[in-house]
Image (spheres, rainbow, N blue to C red):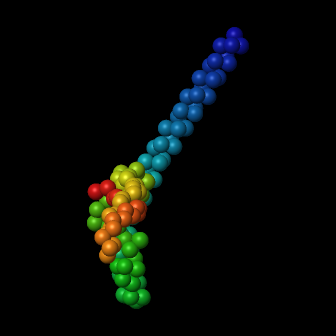
Amino acid sequence: MSTYLKSETKDQQMSTAQNRLNEIEAQEKALAEEKKKLLEANKEADLELVRQLCKRHGFTATQLRGSLRGKGKKTAAKEGAARKPAAKKAAAKKTKAKKIATDRAGSVSVKTHAVFLCPS
């Protein structure tokens, strides 16, 4: 009988915990809805306050750039999404080139100098 009572007690504890979790979820939903309504109600008053402060202090859009929302959503940049890496360019190759030169006497001389070839 004692094992039967122990299993029944565990079932009661689990159901109590599950009931509590359900209550918490319901409270979270109710609070989220209340928050949304309050934000909507205060939006116009907050906007008027921002306008007054901008006029009073002469704030410009450039000064508020980090605080204002842009035209498009840029969530990828905020989330740190991976950007496509830039294409790597091949390193310039160093080769030796020969330069043929003639002097006044007509003798021919060959000079070697380094040339950098850049890939296109």
Residue 1, position in %: x, y? 69, 10
Residue 72, position in %: x, y? 28, 62
Q: Is residue 82 above or below residue 67?
A: above
Tell me the residue at 64%/18% (across/down). Answer: 7
Q: Is residue 70 above or below residue 51?
A: above
For this rendering, which residue is in front, 73 or 42?
73
Residue 70, position in %: x, y? 32, 67
Tell me the residue at 42%/88% (across/down). Answer: 57
Q: Is residue 117 above or below residue 12?
A: below
Which residue is outermost to the top?
1
Q: How many marks?
A: 0
**Quadrant of the image occupied by residue 34:** bottom left
For this rendering, which residue is in front, 112 or 95?
112
Tell me the residue at 53%/34% (across/down). Answer: 19
Note whether residue 45 is visible.
no
For this rendering, which residue is in front, 8 or 108?
108
Note whether residue 114 is visible.
yes
Residue 43, position in %: x, y? 36, 69
Which residue is outermost to the right?
2
Which residue is outermost to the front?
105
Tell me the residue at 53%/38% (across/down). Answer: 21
Quadrant in which the C terminus is drawn: bottom left
**Quadrant of the image occupied by residue 96:** bottom left
**Quadrant of the image occupied by residue 66:** bottom left
